[in-house]
Image (cartoon, helix red, strand yellow):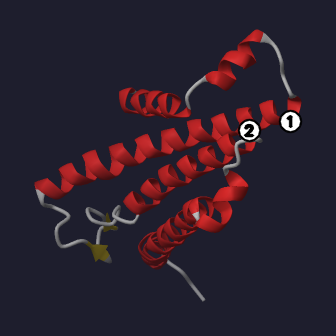
Amino acid sequence: ISFNSYDLKNALEWIQFILVIITLPVVALVGCILNLLIILVIFSKKNKETFFNKRDKGLHLLHRIMAVNGAFNLIECFLVSFRLIGMCLGENAIFCSVIADDPATKYIKLIVIEYIGEVAKTCSILVSFLFTLERYIVTANLDNHFWKKYKKMNLGWFIAAIVLFSFAS
């Protein structure tokens, strides 16, 4: 079997087609479903008493952080599923969206899909860090002045600060 550069290029375009056009929406859909399940399990009536009891405030906060992280991941996965709107693959364009050359499509892709998607990704990373920090605090039982101030901090304000930081960066 002999291969020339055209065959190799054609084979690579088909591999790119399979990886991008077929795999990307499937992974985005699975991510949306799993993150939606995380949010639904945490806020279901059956688990509300277990996850949100008043005695164990650390467990309460950990599950709220998990739900917020699931929401950011859900937004990111949802936006990734629309990434194919303005995409063309290869010189021969094995796949090219009908509206790929429309200026409105390019603005939507740049502002909504890319920018908001990166903001959601940054928020997800920062909330994951917050989850790790909170898990450490719950298991280590830290009692110095800084950790006491941290425990009194409102999660809503902290998440709002993360979102504002993400939009500014």
Height in image: 91 above or below 62? below
Q: How many marks?
A: 2
| Mark nearer the N terminus (2 vs 1) | 2
Q: Which residue appears at 43% of the width and 34% of the height?
A: 163
Residue at 26 percent of width and 45 percent of height:
111
Cα–Cα span, label 2 and label 1: 9 Å
Q: Is residue 57 above or below residue 13?
A: above
Residue type pointed to by label 2: Gly
Residue type beneath disc 1 = Thr
Looking at the image, which residue is at 30% across and 67% down? 91
**Residue 58 is drawn in which quadrant?**
top right
Q: Tell me if 51 is positioned left or right of 155 in this view.
A: right
Task: Check disc 1 and report the residue beneath it.
Answer: 139
Which residue matches tag 2? Answer: 58
Up/down of 121 relative to 3, above or below: above
Residue 60 found in image quarter: top right
Query: Is 76 drawn above or below residue 41 in the view shown?
Result: above
